[in-house]
Amino acid sequence: MKTNNQIVGLVDELGSINEQIKALEVRAKQLKDAVANEFGEGATLGRDFVCKVILSQRATINAKGIVEELEVPQEVVDRFTKISAVITVKTERVQHI
């Protein structure tokens, strides 16, 4: 594991922010659930914000299932597969002994 005094502060700040975001996301979900359960669909007005609860349905396609069902050859799947570079940066708290 690399440690460089110039980046230690950046790594720790990123980790701290990620922890705060996680806690805020948990709280936001709790509040969204409470609003949806209490007021149902429609708009609810607060002092500074309006909250809209919208009920909808989402359809998803199981591409893997279709490929298997129709026995699509791998080379056809490859022709229609887009590959993109992804950079993932994750943080976790260091356990000090």
Image: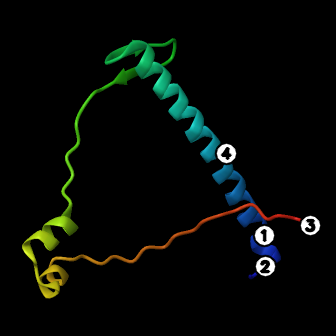
Tell me which amino acid carries mark 2: Thr
Could you say where residue 40 lies in the image, as x and y percent from the top left? 36, 16
In space, the residues marked 1 and 2 are separated at their CA atoms by 7 Å
Does dot 4 land on a helix, a strand or a loop? Answer: helix
Mark 3 residue type: Ile
Compared with 41, 74 (above or below) is below
**Residue at point 19% right, 46% down?**
59
| Residue 3: image tag | 2
Mark 3 burial class by Cα count in 10 Å: few <14, some 14-19, many 20+: few
Closer to viewer: mark 1 or mark 3: 3
| N-terminal label among 2 and 3 | 2
Identity of the residue furthest to the bottom in this view: 75
Q: Point out the tag, 4 or 2, that comes first from the N-terminus.
A: 2
Disc sitting over residue 8 in the figure = 1
Label 3 SS: loop
Q: Position of residue 64 (x, y in %)?
A: 21, 68
